[in-house]
Amino acid sequence: MCRRPRRGGRWAAAAARGGRSLAVFAKMADFLPSRSALSGCFPGCLLTSTEAEQQRKSKEIDKCLNREKTYVKRLVKILLLGAGESGKSTFLKQMRIIHGQDWDRTAREEFRATIYSNVIKGVRVLVDAREKLHIPWGNPDNQNNGDKMMAFDTRSTMVAQGMVETQVFLQYLPAIKSLWADNGIQHAYDRRREFQLGESVKYFLDNLDKLGESMKVIKHSEQILKTALISKNTQLVKLYENLESREKCLLNEAFQPDSVLFRPITLHSESDWISSHPEPTQDFEQFYNDPYRSRPTSQKSAIYVQPIGDLLKYLKKKKPEDAFCIVGITMIDLYPRESWNFVFGQASLTEGMGIFSFARYDSDFYSASYKGRLKRVKKLPSADYSVFDGYYTPVISSLLLLRSCKTLTHEIGHIFGLHHCQWLQCVMQGSNHLEESDRRPLDLCPICLRKLQSAIGFHIVERYQALLGWMDEDRSGMDAELRNEATMGLLKPVEAFKECREWVLKCLDVLQK
């Protein structure tokens, strides 16, 4: 038990005597409890700020471990054993469907790349088996198609993961059709008991037209892309020549036929934006000479992001004087007029305002249990924004953050005067549905990048370094507030940015050569 000395008494009186004070206090120290004893009696009272912070973190970690233990105890693990193509993954997929969790568009889109990979692998197996079984070609001209399939590069990252991009598959589709129609390949298939072949290969090869149905690659010629980027105008050509050589090296990837950084746009269906919303293209010269586009100035150079539920009229009232533009973000589903189903975002190019919605980026949006549905459906006065009070905010997942970054970049691009891109895969592509929106890359194609660089003025390498830094934000460099957020699990989730990060690194490799 800890004893506390009395205020009065002989120790206090002795302390008052000048010459003997130090000696007396030394004796008092023998009677006082030690720091370790006090820490045991009053935990936390004598801790430094650093020790208190470490203790709090330790408790948080203990709580997380206890939660994990509870979760693991309830977790049921099943080990499925079976030979190749015996139906292990099919069993799991069927269990998911039986229990009411159907596949959404994004999941089906991921399966598309897997199906393309399986078809190409299956055709390669058949071509190889035909040769090893000494079966002659039905049409000798198909030898070239067979050689083309066997030369398919299987070392790329996506193919190693069992996925093939749409534009790659479409390049091989005519050869695959011709081979499957060949009597020699059909004879090899009839002898499939002599080699291993995926059971689903025949189904997909019989339906090749469906696999490529309504799909189209927009591939511009090298000269058209070069003109769109550089222009034929002498003044604009000189501006381009004045760029840093490493920047021109990256931008020139726009018209390189085999570029791995900037690929052609692939239309997957008639419902994609370019198919359903025909628009004129905008090259760099048209952008540069546009008299109506907004231009930042030294007085109006700030970009404001305002979380609200209200719309463009509200933004106009709230726009600060130094704002080049103001962008509102909301969890309310948006549509501009009764004839539209919805929009991800909308921007006013002349007023410097835009707004976009997170609503359809929530993975639960299409489920019956979605918590963000408006309870009140009656029409409110134009100045009444009470419907937005206390509105539902979902958990910020990495996928929701990635989708939101794409849309925010897209809408601000419009405010700078960039039209929908129809040149190459680009964040400025129009988007008619979530599946198409997810296919867009996070950043700009070279043509749109040059437009933005002309409007703002920046070094491209610094832009990509900043993007990489944002995705890799070092925790040790964070301030106290952000460290607390990280401890509480509020640090921004960037798992879905992995592919974007790899792309930025490739761009930096080109810029830093």
Image (tube, rainbow, N blue to C red):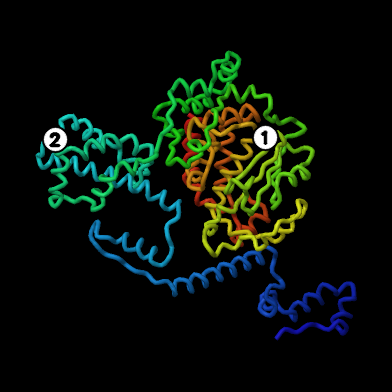
The percent coordinates of residue 413 (x first, y second) are 61, 36
Instruction: Give the image quarter of residue 266.
Output: top left
Q: Indicate whether 139 appears above or below 11.
A: above
Q: For the N terminus, which image quadrant?
A: bottom right
Residue at the (55%, 28%) spot, across then down: 280
N-terminal of the two: label 2 or label 1?
2
Q: Disc 1 designates what residue? A: 349
- Amino acid type indicated by mark 2: Gly
> Residue 236, percent across and down?
59, 18
- Secondary structure under tag 1 reads loop
The answer to whether the residues at label 2 and label 1 have Cβ atoms under 8 Å apart is: no
The answer to whether residue 404 of the structure is visible from this angle is no
> Which numbered marker is on residue 411?
none
| Separation (CA) of disc 2 from disc 1 | 60 Å
Label drawn at residue 138: 2
Closer to us: 230 or 475: 230
Residue 176 image position (x, y, % from top left): 26, 38
Residue at x 42% of width, y 57% of height: 103
Q: Residues within 10 Å of mark 1 (few under 14, many from 20)?
A: many
Q: What kind of element bears circle 2?
A: loop
Q: Residue at x 46, y 36 (%)?
A: 506
